Image: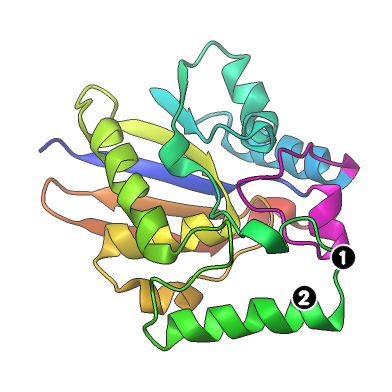
Amino acid sequence: MTKKTLYIVRHGQTELNRLGIVQGRGKNTDLNDEGRWQADRFYQAYKHVAFDKIYISELKRTQQSIQQFIDLGIPYEKLAGLDELAWGILEGQPATPETKSAFLQIVRDWVAGNLDSKFEGGESPNEVQARQREALDVIMSHPEEETVLICMHGRAMRLFLCLLTGKSAVEAEDFPHQNLVLYKVTFDGEKFSIADFNNADHLKKD
């Protein structure tokens, strides 16, 4: 297969991010002022990169995060496989000790290897990675797209990076992230390697 470079970023901050409220696939929120600032900082730092294609999730916060690249005329495509993990009944709930405890407990379940565990109405890591494999097949089926920008979501990005690097989803916590942080991943024709890990240099306040 052809060599590729993937620039994978998480979307910029939303108001629910700021408030510590779980968003997930079911919350189609907008960036807040901080998120728009982050998006502009990322654009200013990486507008020189000649991206052949942009892939985003079907949630508008990903498009808002890289809209300036789209405005350059770079073609883009929405893939449902890049959507955030659905947290089901936890989505949009106030950040209380109870909801935080429930969140931490299910993450502990996943780390312990219970990758089919999920909230009512939500998705498990195994279900998310199943649709991510379909999205990756689409992305990798275009050898002419050598340099690709992907904007997605925090939990989903962790699972996607596990998928690319051959790690178990149990190890998803090994990939830290914040809003609009960058992971640069290269594909040499045989395997994926992380060339830039959790890079937030572009977000440093002057």
Q: What stretch is highlighted in magenta?
A: 14-33
Q: In which quarter of the image is the N terminus?
A: top left
Residue 43 falls in image quadrant: top right
- Going by the numbered disc 1, the residue's amino acid type is Pro
Query: Are discs 2 and 1 less than 8 Å apart at CB?
Result: yes
| Mark 1 crowd level (few <14, some 14–19, many ≥20, 10 Å Cα) | some
Magenta includes 181?
A: no
* The furthest residue to the front: 120
Does residue 62 appear in this view?
A: yes
What residue does disc 2 label?
Answer: 99
By secondary structure, the bulk of the magenta-drawn segment is best described as loop
User: Amino acid type of disc 2?
Assistant: Thr
Q: Between residues 162 and 122, which one lies in front from this camera angle?
A: 122
> Could you tell me residue 98's position as x and y percent?
80, 81
Residue at left offset 29%, top offset 50%: 186
Q: Is residue 76 above or below residue 44?
A: above
x, y percent for residue 159: 42, 62
| Crowding at mark 2 (Cα within 10 Å: few <14, some 14-19, many 20+) | some
Q: Which residue is drawn at 57% across and 54% down?
A: 86
At 86% from the left and 47% from the top, the residue drawn is 34
Q: Is residue 8 above or below residue 193?
A: above
Q: In the picture, which quadrant includes the C terminus? A: bottom right
Alpha carbons under labels 2 and 1: distance apart: 7 Å
* Mark identifier at residue 94: 1
Q: Position of residue 141 (x, y in %)?
A: 20, 29
Of helix, strand and loop, which one carries label 1? loop
